Image (cartoon, helix red, strand yellow):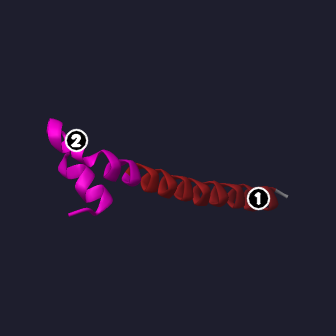
Amino acid sequence: MPDFIMCEFMLVVRRLICHAKLILFEIKMIFCMLNKLVKHQFDRIGIHSEFVKSFCHIG
């Protein structure tokens, strides 16, 4: 019985991890879309960082 419970637990954990990855991907896509929309704003005030460029793979 404990093995069964452990197996179920691992399935739930795996599912949560999978969902978390999808959610992070969605957040990244939204962030990058917003970034493209406001990029000129950021550039104008000088806070468009290297992190954003590398995160969104933009030139």
Instruction: From the top left corner, tell me how far across and down residue 56 is, in percent.
Output: 32, 58
Circle 1: residue type: Glu
Q: Is residue 33 part of the magenta span, yes or no?
A: yes
Residue tagged 2:
42
Observer-nearest residue: 37 or 53?
37
Residue at 32% x, 53% y: name it.
36
Instruction: From the top left corner, tell me how far across and down residue 30 is, in percent.
Output: 45, 51
Magenta stretch, residue numbers = 32-59
> What predominant SS class does the magenta segment belong to?
helix
Circle 2: residue type: Phe
- Badge 2, how many Cα within 10 Å: few under 14, some, many 20+? some
Residue at 85% x, 58% y: name it.
1
* SS category of the residue bearing label 2: helix
Residue 20 vs residue 51: left or right? right
Residue tagged 1:
8
- Badge 1, how many Cα within 10 Å: few under 14, some, many 20+? few
Residue at 18% x, 39% y: name it.
47
In three-dimensional space, the C-alpha distance between marks 1 and 2, rounded to whole angstroms, equals: 47 Å
The quarter of the displayed image where residue 28 is located: bottom left
CB contact under 8 Å: marks 1 and 2 = no
The quarter of the displayed image where residue 4 is located: bottom right
Residue 10 vs residue 48: left or right? right
